Image (cartoon, rainbow, N blue to C red):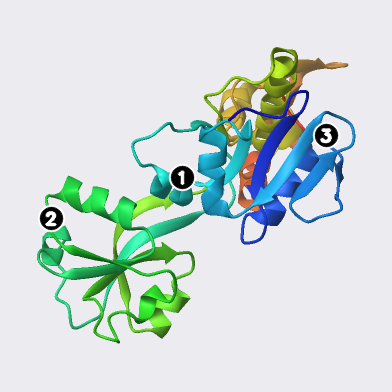
């Protein structure tokens, strides 16, 4: 199957934990979203692009088959969808929707590593991911596939352990389970179809990817401006978190001080500002960054 001629398609989750953040990313990339007459298809007002809003586990297939050119999906869903057929290309991680697929066990199971699962039953909603992980560990176990409420499996004697997504761990604790092993660290990713778009849309597709990369790069980034004594310049620039090569400019009428401007890719905490001030920095200004390319 190929994309509809003359328009790009982007697949996003219709509902769930990635839905709103995916739409925010699309909007932040400068695309004006217009809701359609049905809830499955939204149109982009300022570009020949359609947003296809579907179940999250359909997104990898739609993108791999060329039904959609781009998609936003969790790595956990993407990895579970891998079946030996054509796969979508992961363009970049998006920095939201973070969670972890973990092995969790009740206190009655003496867990001392993956070998403790040998010959036991493990319940999960991610059987393919779990089977690959067990094979990598050299463990033979029975995988029990469940579509929901995986955490109750040990209590109902359906399984000895579970493999499930964990964000805060509260659900596991409520069911008397302890997370013991990480199977997969997951976050939302942008994926791209191996099927090329219509030639006249190739530049637009690349532009959208570049815009989204700019949005992702600016998440959490700060623009820091300060005045610094020349004598302490090296120590002050070393304190700027995630800054590559800051811009250093002379100050009018000051031979002993310079102005420093830097893009900080990591969080700038109050403790950072206090350390900068202790090294003689002054007039410190921290600004959010909306877009960066």
Is 175 placed above or below 130 here?
below
Q: Characterize the local packing of mark 3: few (<14), some (14-19) or many (20 or more) Cα atoms within 10 angstroms.
A: some
Q: Which residue is mark 1?
A: 78
* Count of marks, rendered view: 3
Ranked by sequence position, the earlier of labels 3 and 2 is 3
Is residue 229 visible in the rendered structure shown here? no
User: What element does badge 2 sit on?
Assistant: loop
CA gap, disc 1 and disc 2? 23 Å
- Quadrant housing residue 257: top right
Is residue 173 visible in the rendered structure shown here? yes
For the N terminus, the image quarter is top right
Q: Residue at x 43, y 65 (%)?
A: 166
Task: Report whether 181 appears left or right of 55.
Answer: left
CA gap, disc 3 and disc 2? 48 Å
Percent coordinates x, y for residue 60 in the rendering: 51, 42
Q: Residue at x 23, y 81 (%)?
A: 107
Per the rendering, the mark at residue 213 is none
For the C terminus, the image quarter is top right
Ranked by sequence position, the earlier of labels 1 and 3 is 3
Percent coordinates x, y for residue 81 in the rendering: 42, 46
Is 63 placed above or below 154 here?
above
Q: Which residue is mark 2?
A: 139
Is 96 placed above or below 293 here?
below
User: What element does badge 1 sit on?
Assistant: helix
């Amino acid at each position: 199957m190929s994309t509809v001629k003359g328009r790009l398609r982007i697949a996003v989750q219709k509902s769930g934990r990635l839905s709103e953040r995916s739409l925010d990313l699309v909007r932040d990339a400068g695309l004006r979203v217009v809701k359609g007459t049905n809830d499955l298809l939204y149109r982009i007002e300022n570009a020949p692009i359609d947003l296809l809003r579907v179940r999250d586990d359909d997104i990898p297939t739609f993108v791999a088959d060329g039904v959609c050119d781009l998609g936003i999906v969790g790595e956990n869903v993407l990895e579970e969808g891998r079946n030996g057929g054509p796969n979508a290309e992961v363009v970049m991680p998006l920095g939201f929707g973070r969670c972890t697929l973990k092995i969790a066990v009740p206190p009655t199971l003496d867990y001392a590593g993956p070998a403790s699962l040998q010959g036991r039953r493990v319940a999960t909603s991610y059987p393919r991911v779990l089977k690959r992980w067990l094979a990598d560990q050299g463990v033979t176990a029975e995988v029990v596939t469940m579509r929901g409420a995986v955490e109750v499996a040990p209590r109902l004697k359906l399984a000895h352990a579970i493999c499930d997504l964990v964000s805060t761990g509260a659900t596991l604790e409520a069911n008397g389970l302890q997370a013991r092993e990480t199977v997969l660290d997951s976050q939302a990713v942008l994926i791209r179809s191996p099927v090329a778009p219509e030639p006249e849309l190739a530049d637009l597709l690349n532009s959208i990817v570049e815009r989204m990369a700019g949005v992702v790069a600016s998440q959490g980034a700060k623009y820091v401006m300060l005045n610094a004594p020349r004598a302490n310049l090296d120590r002050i620039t070393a304190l700027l978190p995630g800054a590559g090569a800051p811009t250093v400019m002379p100050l009018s009428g000051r031979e002993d001080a310079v102005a420093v401007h830097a893009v900080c890719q990591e969080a700038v905490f109050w403790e950072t500002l206090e350390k900068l001030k202790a090294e003689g920095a002054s007039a410190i200004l921290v600004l959010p960054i909306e877009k960066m390319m």
